[in-house]
Amino acid sequence: MSVLLKDKVEIRENRLHTILTFNGDAKSLDEASRDNKLKIGRFKFSQCGNCQEGCAFMQVYSIHDAAVVSHSPIGCYANVSERWNGMANVAKIRGKDSFSHHAICTNIQESDTIYGGAKKLRHAIEEAYKRYSPKVIYVTTSCASGIVGDDVHSVAKEMSAELGIPVFAVECEGFKSRIWSTGFDAAFNGILNTALKAPEKKQEDLVNVFNFSGVDTFTPLLKTINLRPNYLVETRSFDEISRMAEAACTSTICETLGTFVADRLEKIYGVPQVRAPAPYGIQWTDRWLREVAKLTGRESIVEEAIKKEHERIAPELNELREFFKGKKVYIFSGASYAHNMASVCYDLGLEVIGITTYHHDQQYDTKEINTVKYLVETMGNVPNYTICNKQPYQVIKFLSKLSPDFLIVRHQALTVLGYKLGIPSIMEGDSNKCVGYDGTIDLGRRIQKILKTRKLYENIARNVEFPYTEWWLKKDTDPFAFVGGL
């Protein structure tokens, strides 16, 4: 195995200088990030939070013929039914075999935190092997197993030798990183360590696309230049994932998800990354297709393909732009995906008056990639750019100050806050839905539809009372009053 792959991956705070708080504009954020000048930030008061264990579990659990052992108390495992339901729906959408549940929790108890849980972990791995006959077993760790100090890596290696299949410890204890997306890196580190192998042959028409669950929008987009996508990793089999080095190039729907795995795949087996913004919005889709064409030897046909797509969508795009004149949008999402949404909205003729991301990587594993820079280059400065890790008490301050015409949110819980403030809101749960030219039109149609329901949201707002003091709800109270610098 390559020296670039280790038992564990460095956390984002150290590797990418990731931050959790910022208040300014997009241009200032980009400039300050170039020298890693910004501090991570510490919240003196929080209403909620995310854990990297959830992100790690989600990725390895999504592999079709893997098994996952969650070495944790049952609470860390509590939403596994939701994850299974999501993966089962994705498998159905993509025409795959039915997605079966394949995870076990060691259910760490108080006594295990005293005497250790290694014996229980061995038993759980054996049970997972008997129940699911997997091709690989991933062990995700938790705060409890980390505090106890269970040597999960040694247990995994011993069980791998005993069972004759890869067993890998995905180190993702929540307390080790305040950045939830570190869990993506931990999961992909496990996947690369167990599944990645040298290509037997190159498939010159295959493009790796690291993405979340969603509809198949990359197939028609790539078909315009005679290519096909290799979706990774959700609902894919272990064997399918093992052939990712055969692809001609690698792209990702957002760098928050795929910065680590795309970088390692390029450095280990020379699969080049698409060094262009993800294909969201007209301009970014153009740039992305041109870069993909360059990497796959299709430069002779890409311009004609782009021209045809522009002509095809032009009538409806112009109608949408006319409808959206003077309309203002606010976007809440993970860092890179928020920039994707802003690109789509900008090309629809909307004014992006503000963006809030849940964190920000000041660097990416591939230095040439910078989605904030792409954003500023494309649409100019975004005057209201903030970072907060989903804190509702801050969100209502941002929205109340700017009063956008509608709100786009990537995670459902914050959509409700838009409703309560009387703002029509869209929860963009399917990250693939607004990909490419058709995706831009589709989002425009949905926004147009939801703007016609404003009276419903205004009625909701009249009947809502927030659980905050008058002092906090005053306009001149700083939304970052509970944030420190380190």
Image (spheres, helix red, strand yellow):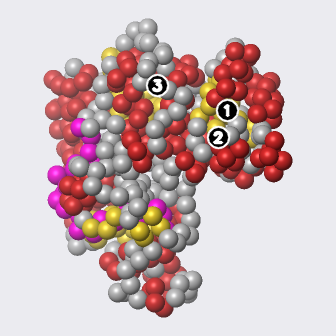
Within the image, what quadrant is residue 298 found in? top left
- Mark 2–mark 3 Cα distance, whole angstroms, equals 19 Å
- At x 43% / y 42%, what residue is drawn? 257
Q: Circle 3 is placed at which residue position?
A: 5
Question: Would you say the residues marked 2 and 1 are in contact, meaning their CB atoms lie under 8 Å apart?
Answer: yes
Residue at 48% across, 47% down: 181
Above or below, 146 relative to 271: below
| Amino acid on which disc 1 is placed | Val
Residue type at tag 2 = Thr
Q: Earlier in the sequence, mark 2 or mark 1?
A: 2
- Residue that badge 2 annotates: 141
Q: Secondary structure at mark 3?
A: loop
Which image quadrant for residue 256?
top left
Q: Quadrant of the C terminus?
A: bottom left
- Asked whether residue 214 appears in the rendered view, the answer is no
- Highlighted magenta segment, given as a residue range: 368-392
Decide if residue 422 is in sight here: yes
Percent of width and height locating residue 65: 65, 26
Circles 1 and 3: CB atoms closer than 8 Å: no
Residue 465 versus residue 93: which sits nearer the camera? 465
Crowd rating for badge 1 (residues with CA inside 10 Å; few <14, some 14–19, many 20+): many
Q: Is residue 6 left or right of residue 168?
A: left
Taking the view exactly as shown, the residue that stands out farthest to the right is 111
Q: Secondary structure at mark 1?
A: helix
Residue position for label 1: 152
Q: Amino acid at mark 3?
A: Leu
Find residue 152 and report its horizontal and vertical position in percent: 67, 32
Q: Is residue 407 above or below residue 220?
A: below
* Residue 357 horizontal side relative to residue 98, left or right: left
